[in-house]
Image (cartoon, coloured by chain):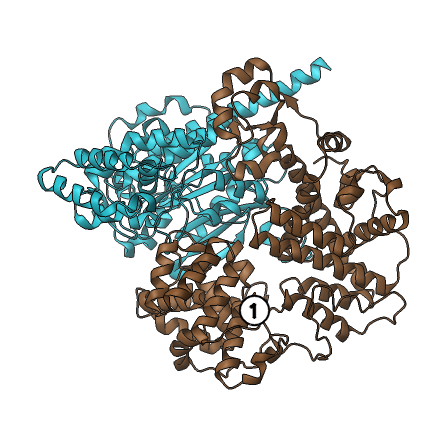
Chain colours: A brown, B cyan
């Protein structure tokens, strides 16, 4: 946290950890726009994979590691074997290339993702997970080396202390067993430097110090990395006006940054096409389970707490409710409960106008994606928001599905997916069962996407069903060529090769959109 | 009952008197100025006022105690909230370039609200509280205060009654005020054991081995459980409430649940004593105990008694929280500091209302002069105010606040001494 952050801050996360490579500063070489774009898009794809795997698998599990390594080498980023610094064994040029790409692409995304709190949080989270994975693949001695290089030195505790704290250390730390306490080094670290362990209650805390086993040292490294990266992003944000005055980069960076959630479903063509009377029946037919539940709770209790209002309110905005409709809708329901019209106007109307970008910072908020619903702000007492597949007791979920007349076989399939933590797939299965189709034909990542797909199916958009077409064309995505038939992992990305003319923004947009909608 | 005579309609008439003669401005300023160690610490602090008709004024800030005093006496806020210390004066936030106006520091705060316990208390619901369920707040204070001190090493935790249905904690140590958002949220998660919303029945899951923090917390819960939950809330008193508890036992025991139910039903027919019923339940559960269910009864106890934090309040540096000594407009009660040495005896219904202390002020009381001796050095204007509040039942709570402030002052002095010693050594 001192002044001397440069040695680490300015290094891209990996090459710094990998080996004593020279490049500790942002890249200064010239780079063609097309390469700039390719690098950025591919790193984004990698981070996107990191995010997706993090939801589908337990981080650090065998499957997770295998799939992530596959993606890393698939996209030609440096990994494992190369990280040991034994450069001779590698095909020199390729290795050098990979590192260059790793380095440059990280810094490009810093530019694109420093602009808002939300973007920063997402970027830091994914880069942290990537870093954790890569660090985990290092050999033990390289880990220690790394600590020293980055001046992360901490006091170890004495044998006497170990003996007196033995019981507590064993009870609090998974990687310590009774016998191993005396053998290994245990570091005494200010708790602020080990937040991940504190958060998960996997460390012994006393008087503001965390007692960390040698195996858990990665937490410190990550914590340090997080601090530095987030400071660096704040600094980058300040220099942004200069960057944005470059008219070649500005649209590119803008697009890169808002691509992270895929289509954001904030700009709608069908604004005002839905009447309030339709909502009850739509909730049953075309809402994903999370929204159906929120709607039901709202109707039953004439109230939703903040988390629920945000999740459901933005969804409704996304399917086309106007601000006036939204106000009418919420007011009508709330006044049936304990809130009178006057109180509603004072206490709740503001936040609804806020959602539509009419108050405060005037940000036009976008509906929540599945990942956001699943990962952030879990429901607590009195809350009905969240993802029913993620945040319900299995038994309650089962009963709910039964009450919605799903077949027993279907319910079992859903419960299996839930058990494997494939919440989005479970929801997709729910879609298939409630719409009586074999294969949804799209990959679900947004509640509003669920709604759009359902409407397409129910209102005669039959022909769409068979095609593995990009799922959201009906929702006002920018005009696109249909030639990108292959939606495979890397299909659409290899098109812009160095030497190509600078892609127009529209094409760029296509690449990114297809990237984010299809995996 | 003195609190009965508070009438919300009289608040506009009472507030001017309260801010003119009773509000402890000196202590309040002494608190938020933190010894004047950091430049502009008080000046850059956000206050926000709720005025008549729910008019909400954010980003108020004041140069010094007397400006704060004058402004509060002018505006007579129904409610006062305290926000963060910003990079610039909050009342000038519109004049600085956007993006540069940032929340830098704030006390680490916790907000515990009785409404969050509605699924586990039978005596009251939503905003209502009674002396029975208040035990939940006592438990919360004991558990969190211990952890904040012993685990996290904080020393200056100010616990405050919110004025209606909950308590707040202000951790005021230098290091606490500087915590990042990530650190605040990590602390909250460390301290949270009850998780899940309306779609989760079983909200506590313990894993093996049990972490020392959980053990310490359990010890507190165990101390109160029998008297509070079994007897007070009578959680095994009816079939419905007993079923609610059985639903928390993991499935591999539930497999035998019909048998357990039968057993219990038969036992309950003859046995009325809540503690004996609990013992029976415990032994039945333990008999079937598998690995997954090893902690079933501990989990039940925690679900019914463990503090429920409003995490969002604690996480944000810029989040506002109701200020100590603000009046609660609904109950008229003053938001007062709680004496930790006597936390079991704290009774929210004894906390004075604004009507009560206004009345006390109007009744001349004999012998008030005697209490004054030690305030000799304070200035004359202060003296009058001190004399005023000392004549009311607010006095003992302000004393608690004074003690808290003295403690912080001692730490600051100790820190200064330590630093100058270090310099000497060099």
Q: Residue furthest left?
A: B270
Q: Dot 1, crowdedness within 10 Å: few (<14), some or many (≥20)?
A: some
Residue A381 point in image, percent of width and height: 38, 51
The residue tagged 1 is A357
Q: How many marks?
A: 1
Residue A357 point in image, percent of width and height: 56, 69
Residue placed most toward the observer, B318 or B369: B318
Say whether residue A159 is left or right of residue B218: right
Give the residue drawn at x 78%, y 42%: A81
Question: Which quadrant holds the N terminus of chain A?
Answer: top right
Q: Secondary structure at mark 1?
A: loop
Examine the rendered structure and indicate whether residue A482 appears above or below residue A17. Answer: below
Say whether residue B235 is left or right of residue A188: left
> Quarter-wise, where is residue B361 in the image?
top left
Examine the rendered structure and indicate whether residue A226 appears above or below residue B51. Answer: above
Residue placed most toward the observer, A298 or A168: A168
> Quarter-wise, where is residue B205 in the image?
top left
Residue B201 point in image, percent of width and height: 34, 51
Question: Which quadrant holds the C terminus of chain A?
Answer: bottom right
Give the residue drawn at x 70%, y 53%: A70
> Quarter-wise, where is residue A182 in the image?
top right
């Amino acid at each position: 946290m001192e002044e001397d952050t440069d040695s680490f801050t300015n290094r891209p996360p990996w090459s710094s950890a990998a080996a004593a490579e020279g490049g500790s500063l942002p890249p200064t070489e010239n780079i063609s726009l097309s390469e700039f774009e390719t690098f950025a898009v591919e790193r984004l794809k990698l981070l996107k994979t990191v995010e997706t795997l993090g939801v589908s698998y337990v981080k650090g599990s065998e499957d997770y590691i295998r799939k992530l390594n596959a993606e890393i080498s698939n996209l030609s980023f440096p990994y494992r074997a190369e990280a040991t610094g034994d450069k001779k064994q590698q095909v020199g040029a390729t290795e050098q290339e990979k590192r260059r790409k790793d380095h440059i692409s990280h810094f490009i995304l810093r530019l694109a993702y420093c602009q808002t709190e939300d973007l920063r949080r997402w970027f830091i989270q994914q880069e942290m997970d990537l870093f954790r994975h890569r660090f985990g693949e290092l050999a033990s001695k390289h880990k220690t080396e790394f600590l020293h290089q980055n001046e992360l030195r901490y006091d170890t505790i004495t044998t006497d202390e170990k003996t007196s704290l033995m019981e507590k250390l064993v009870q609090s730390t998974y990687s310590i067993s009774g016998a191993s306490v005396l053998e290994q080094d245990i570091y005494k670290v200010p708790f602020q430097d080990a937040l991940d362990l504190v958060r998960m209650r996997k460390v012994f805390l006393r008087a503001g110090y965390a007692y960390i086993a040698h195996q858990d040292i990665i937490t410190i490294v990550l914590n340090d990395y997080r601090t530095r990266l987030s400071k660096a992003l704040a600094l980058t944000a300040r220099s942004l006006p200069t960057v944005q005055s470059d008219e070649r980069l500005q649209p590119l960076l803008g697009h890169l940054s808002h691509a992270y959630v895929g289509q954001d479903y904030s700009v709608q063509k069908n604004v005002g096409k839905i009447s309030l009377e339709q909502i009850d029946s739509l909730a049953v037919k075309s809402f994903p389970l999370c929204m159906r539940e929120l709607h039901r709770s709202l109707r039953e209790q004439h109230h939703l707490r903040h988390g629920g209002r945000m999740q459901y309110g933005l969804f409704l905005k996304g399917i086309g409710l106007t601000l006036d409709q939204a106000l009418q809708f919420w007011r009508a329901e709330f006044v049936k409960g304990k809130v009178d019209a006057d109180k509603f106007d004072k206490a709740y109307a503001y936040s609804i106008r806020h959602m539509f970008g009419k108050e405060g910072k005037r940000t036009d908020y976008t509906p929540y994606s599945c990942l956001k619903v699943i990962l952030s702000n879990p429901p607590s007492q009195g809350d009905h928001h969240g993802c029913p597949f993620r945040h319900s007791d299995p038994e309650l979920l089962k009963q709910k599905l039964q009450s919605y007349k799903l077949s027993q076989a279907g319910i079992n399939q859903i419960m299996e997916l839930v058990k494997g933590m494939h919440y989005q797939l479970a929801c997709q299965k729910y879609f298939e069962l409630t719409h009586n189709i074999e294969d949804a034909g799209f990959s679900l990542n947004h509640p509003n996407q669920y709604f759009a797909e359902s409407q397409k199916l129910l209102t005669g958009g039959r022909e769409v069903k068979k095609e593995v077409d990009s799922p959201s064309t009906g929702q006002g995505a920018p005009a696109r060529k249909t030639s990108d038939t292959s939606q495979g992992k890397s299909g659409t990305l290899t098109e812009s090769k160095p030497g190509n003319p600078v892609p127009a923004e529209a094409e760029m947009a296509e690449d990114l959109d297809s990237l984010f909608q299809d995996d | 009952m003195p609190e009965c005579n508070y009438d919300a309609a009289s608040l506009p008439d009472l507030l001017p008197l309260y801010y003119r003669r009773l509000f402890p401005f000196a202590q309040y300023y002494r608190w938020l100025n933190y010894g004047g160690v950091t430049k502009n610490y008080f000046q850059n602090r956000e206050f926000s006022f709720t005025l008549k008709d729910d008019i909400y004024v954010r980003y108020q800030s004041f140069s010094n105690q007397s400006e704060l005093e004058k402004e509060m006496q002018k505006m007579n806020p129904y409610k006062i909230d305290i926000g963060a210390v910003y990079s610039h004066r909050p009342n000038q936030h519109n004049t600085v370039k956007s993006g540069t106006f940032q929340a830098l520091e704030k006390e680490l705060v916790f907000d515990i609200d009785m409404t969050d316990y509605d699924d586990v208390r039978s005596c009251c619901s939503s905003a209502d509280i009674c002396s029975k369920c208040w035990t939940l707040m006592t438990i919360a204070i004991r558990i969190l205060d211990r952890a904040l001190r012993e685990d996290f090493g904080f020393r200056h935790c100010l616990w405050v009654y919110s004025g209606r249905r909950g308590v707040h904690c202000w951790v005021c140590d230098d290091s606490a005020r500087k915590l990042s958002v990530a650190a605040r949220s990590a602390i909250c998660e460390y301290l949270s054991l009850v998780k899940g919303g309306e779609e989760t029945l079983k909200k506590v899951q313990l894993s093996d081995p049990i972490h020392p923090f959980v053990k310490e917390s359990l010890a507190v819960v165990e101390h109160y459980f029998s008297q509070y939950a079994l007897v007070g809330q009578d959680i095994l008193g009816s079939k419905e409430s007993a079923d609610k508890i059985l639903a928390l036992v993991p499935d591999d025991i539930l497999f035998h649940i019909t048998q357990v139910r039968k057993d219990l039903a038969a036992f309950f027919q003859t046995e009325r004593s809540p503690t004996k019923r609990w013992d029976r339940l415990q032994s039945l559960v333990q008999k079937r105990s598998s690995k997954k269910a090893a902690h079933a009864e501990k989990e039940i106890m925690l679900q019914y008694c463990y503090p429920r934090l409003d995490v969002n309040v604690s996480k944000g540096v810029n989040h506002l929280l109701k200020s100590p000594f603000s009046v609660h407009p609904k109950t008229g009660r003053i938001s007062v500091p709680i004496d930790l040495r006597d936390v079991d005896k704290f009774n929210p219904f004894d906390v004075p209302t604004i009507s009560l202390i206004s009345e006390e002020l109007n009744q001349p009381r004999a012998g008030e002069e005697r209490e004054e001796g030690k305030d000799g050095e304070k200035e004359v204007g202060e003296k009058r105010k001190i004399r005023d509040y000392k004549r009311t039942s607010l006095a003992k709570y302000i004393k608690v606040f004074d003690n808290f402030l003295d403690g912080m002052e001692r730490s600051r002095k100790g820190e200064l001494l330590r630093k100058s010693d270090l310099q000497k050594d060099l």
